[in-house]
Image: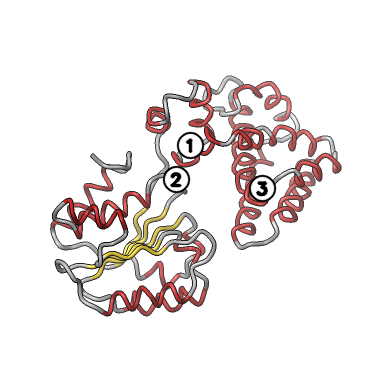
Amino acid sequence: MHSFFGHHQRWEQISRLIEQGELSHALLFYGPDGIGKKIFALEMAETILCQDERCIHQMRNGTFPDFLLIEDDKMIRVDAIASVQRFLTERPVFGDKKVVIVDNAHLMNIQAQNKFLKTLEEPPSFSHIILITSQIHQLVDTIRSRTMAVPFEPLSSDLIYNNLPKTASEQDRRIATDFSLGSFGKALEILEDPERKRIFFLPPEIFRAMIEYDYVKLLQLTKSLEKQQYPLLLDHMAIWLRDLSLIRTDHNSRQVLYQEFRDLLIRQSQTIMSFHIAPLMERVETAREQIEYNVNPEIVTYAMLMDMQEEIHR
């Protein structure tokens, strides 16, 4: 029984490579946040390294000498990569393998990435290195080219809904599932953080303000968020645009996520035409990339809204 769910076909493929001794020395797991990439990697490491429960227990306690996990939520610096290199200079204590996992690998700064390249160029024969990222474009091309890329797809709505805590109401579980964008982690966050629900319902106000040329309202809405909330707003701006596109094609589309705003979507679709959708989406994606590269999110978002407003009225 795996701790992750979904990705079973991917597990069979990786397990087969492990059994046949053909697993690459360097893998790159990429896909959206919160879909189980790290849990998958940890269980994969246990499969490679462990023959008994004692080993598994030590790994989960962080005391197994042939396993190293590098993780940070801000920046991974050169000294962390130096520790990886020291770890890989010595042969395994138990068995014949060592495993290194670097979570949020995109948080390696450029110096760390360049240092890591030396390890990837000539990895020890006994090593398996797993990089995990939700932002693959932030890794330099040379790292990507020296690893076996393993994509992880968003989870299905049924999987997410059926695995959410039954202590939450059916309505809350459904909202969390619909707005999770295929991420179980995001679905859990939605259930646990009522503030996120407020952000879900900002796009209707934002698009109304853009249509009405209400600069003051746009500025107020932009300033109402905490720094970490801007990426979530961009996610839901993209969902609103998707729903507008669906509504233009079919007013009764069941794929619309903003179901309770269907009438407003229909009204806005009379102003926001089909030829607007692609350039508006591009502006959202550009803003997302700028925020990922640590440009001030409030400034980026307000500039994006000004550009989108001009596009709508062009």
Label 3 or label 1, whichever lies nearer to me, is 1
Secondary structure of the residue carrying tag 1 is helix
**What's the amino acid at mark 1?**
Leu
How many residues crowd around disc 3 within 10 Å: few (fewer than 14), some, or many (20 or more)? some
Distance in Å between CA atoms under marks 1 and 2: 9 Å
For this view, does 151 lie left or right of residue 93?
Answer: right
Residue closer to the observer: 228 or 16: 228
Distance in Å between CA atoms under marks 3 and 2: 28 Å
- Which residue position holds label 1? 188
Q: Which of marks 1 and 2 is nearer the N terminus?
A: 2
Q: Earlier in the sequence, mark 3 or mark 1?
A: 1
- The residue under the point 15% across, 62% down is 21
Image coordinates for residue 90, horizontal then vertical, percent: 24, 78
- Quadrant of res 244: top right
**What's the amino acid at mark 2?**
Gly
Image coordinates for residue 95, horizontal then vertical, percent: 14, 66
How many residues crowd around disc 1 within 10 Å: few (fewer than 14), some, or many (20 or more)? some
- Which residue position holds label 2? 34
For this view, does 9 lie left or right of residue 151?
Answer: left
Residue 83, above or below 201: below
The label on residue 279 is 3
Distance in Å between CA atoms under marks 3 and 1: 32 Å
- The residue under the point 62% across, 27% down is 247
Residue 47, above or below 166: below
How many residues crowd around disc 2 within 10 Å: few (fewer than 14), some, or many (20 or more)? many
Residue closer to the observer: 230 or 14: 230
Image coordinates for residue 59, horizontal then vertical, percent: 27, 57
For this view, does 110 lie left or right of residue 219?
Answer: left
- The residue under the point 38% across, 62% down is 131
Q: Which quarter of the rendered picture does the C terminus lie within?
A: top right
